[in-house]
Image (cartoon, helix red, strand yellow):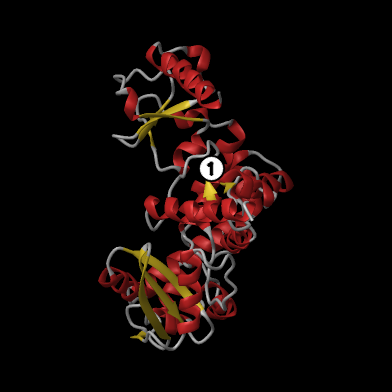
């Protein structure tokens, strides 16, 4: 019955698209898989094949799932005014490459009070304006240090008032001193191992503090290449025995023999990313949540897109179970290591649930 209702609803939406029915304006959007573009129902473009079309509830859902806005009907113009203002604040912050704008400076751009802007910005984006700007500044600094630029020049040109200000933040933002980061982790020792599994190959990389990366792929060589690109001057060695117990625990998890992983970690991310990753670790085995669920659980219901981005940036697959997060319509959504692997993991976990109910 539910399937029939869904099909009936989609047929209604499809007819609205065919008829360019303005009565549905703002109520839904449609994406075209073959082009990767999403449109308003009244879009004047030539109608796509029905089998290439999916229906989306919002601009945010469309962009989280990877669709680009149509240049003809400009669906982004349907974003509510307050969200548009917050996005304008983001664009303004991004343009100020030599300093972090003050709250009063941002307020003058969108005619909001400081307290209201601070509150609404955090609700929609997931972090405060300062945290957003600080993360951008850190990212620009990383890029310039990696390019070999002098540390002093990179520090001042990216908006740090002094080198001491940066060094106070360095352990948190860079995970190491600027000099070490400039050398792409040259003084860091990373040990990794690769093992075959039902998902292809598993790569687990560790530092002296814990696991820093868990990757999945079809070819061991490609996984090694990705790791070496990320830490291209670190001391990286392969050793399949040093942390054999950790690797076996992850392999047991993939096989469905264990349902929880409690291993030492050494991962870095923004404050918001860490909040999301911690929320994902609380999702029980064999259960799923939506991106919107996670955003609400973090008391940031407007930060659905930011949640999706944090899932995509998860450096430790499986341990942080981003495979348990779905779209609001129940479809799988994306997965950094391939949608087929996500489906296999969810199938494995649902099998455990069925077996448990039969005992």
Residue 335 in view in this figure: no
Judged from this view, the residue extending furthest toward the front is 359
Q: Quadrant of the C terminus?
A: bottom right
What is the crowding at mark 1: few (fewer than 14 residues within 10 Å), some, or many (at least 20)?
A: some
Q: Position of residue 232 (x, y in %)?
A: 32, 78
Above or below — where is 227 with respect to 358? below
Closest to the observer: 124 or 195? Answer: 195
Counting the numbered discs, the total is: 1
Q: Position of residue 191 (x, y in %)?
A: 40, 84
Above or below — where is 102 with respect to 36? below
Above or below — where is 154 with respect to 69? below
Q: Residue 36 lies in what quarter of the image?
A: top left
Tell me the residue at 48%/67% (across/down): 316
Closest to the observer: 14 or 20? Answer: 14
Tell me the residue at 70%/49% (across/down): 299
Residue 132 in view in this figure: yes
Q: Position of residue 177 (x, y in %)?
A: 49, 83
Q: Position of residue 276 (x, y in %)?
A: 59, 58
Tell me the residue at 42%/75% (across/down): 204
Above or below — where is 313 with respect to 24? below
Tell me the residue at 50%/38% (across/down): 61
Closest to the observer: 144 or 1? Answer: 1
Closest to the observer: 49 or 261? Answer: 261
Q: Is residue 344 left or right of residue 262?
A: left
Mark 1 lies on residue: 87
Q: Is residue 161 left or right of residue 197?
A: right
Q: Quadrant of the N terminus?
A: top right
Q: Residue 81 lies in what quarter of the image?
A: top right
**What SS does tag 1 mark?**
helix
């Amino acid at each position: 019955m539910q399937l029939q209702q869904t099909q009936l609803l989609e047929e209604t939406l499809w007819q609205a698209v065919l008829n360019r029915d303005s009565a549905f304006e703002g109520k839904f959007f449609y994406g075209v898989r073959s082009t990767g573009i999403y449109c308003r129902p009244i879009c004047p473009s030539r109608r796509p094949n029905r089998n290439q079309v999916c229906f989306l509830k919002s601009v945010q859902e469309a962009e989280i799932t990877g669709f680009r806005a149509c240049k003809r009907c400009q669906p982004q113009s349907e974003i509510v005014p307050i969200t548009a203002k917050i996005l304008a604040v983001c664009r303004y912050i991004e343009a100020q490459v030599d300093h972090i704008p003050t709250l009063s400076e941002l307020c003058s751009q969108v005619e909001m009070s400081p307290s209201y802007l601070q509150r609404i910005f955090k609700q929609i984006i997931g972090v405060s304006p300062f945290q957003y700007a600080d993360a951008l500044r850190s990212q620009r600094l990383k890029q310039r240090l990696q390019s070999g630029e002098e540390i002093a020049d990179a520090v001042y040109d990216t908006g740090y008032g002094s080198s001491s200000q940066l060094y106070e933040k360095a352990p948190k933002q860079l995970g190491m001193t600027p000099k070490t980061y400039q050398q792409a982790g040259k003084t860091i020792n990373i040990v990794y191992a690769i093992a075959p599994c039902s998902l292809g190959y598993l790569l687990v990389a560790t530092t002296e503090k814990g696991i820093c990366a868990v990757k999945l792929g079809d070819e061991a060589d490609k996984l090694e290449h990705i790791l070496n690109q990320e830490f291209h001057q670190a001391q990286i060695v392969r050793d399949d025995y040093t942390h054999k117990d950790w690797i076996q625990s992850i392999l047991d998890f993939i096989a469905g023999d264990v349902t929880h992983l409690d291993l030492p970690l050494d991962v870095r991310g923004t404050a918001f990313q860490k909040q999301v990753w911690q929320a994902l670790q609380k999702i029980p085995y064999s259960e799923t949540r939506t991106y919107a669920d996670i955003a609400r659980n973090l008391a940031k219901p407007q930060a659905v897109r930011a949640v999706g981005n944090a899932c995509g940036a998860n450096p430790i697959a499986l341990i942080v179970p981003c495979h348990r997060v779905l779209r609001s319509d129940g479809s799988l959504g994306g997965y950094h290591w391939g949608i087929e692997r996500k489906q296999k993991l969810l199938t494995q976990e649902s099998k455990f649930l069925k077996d448990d109910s039969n005992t």
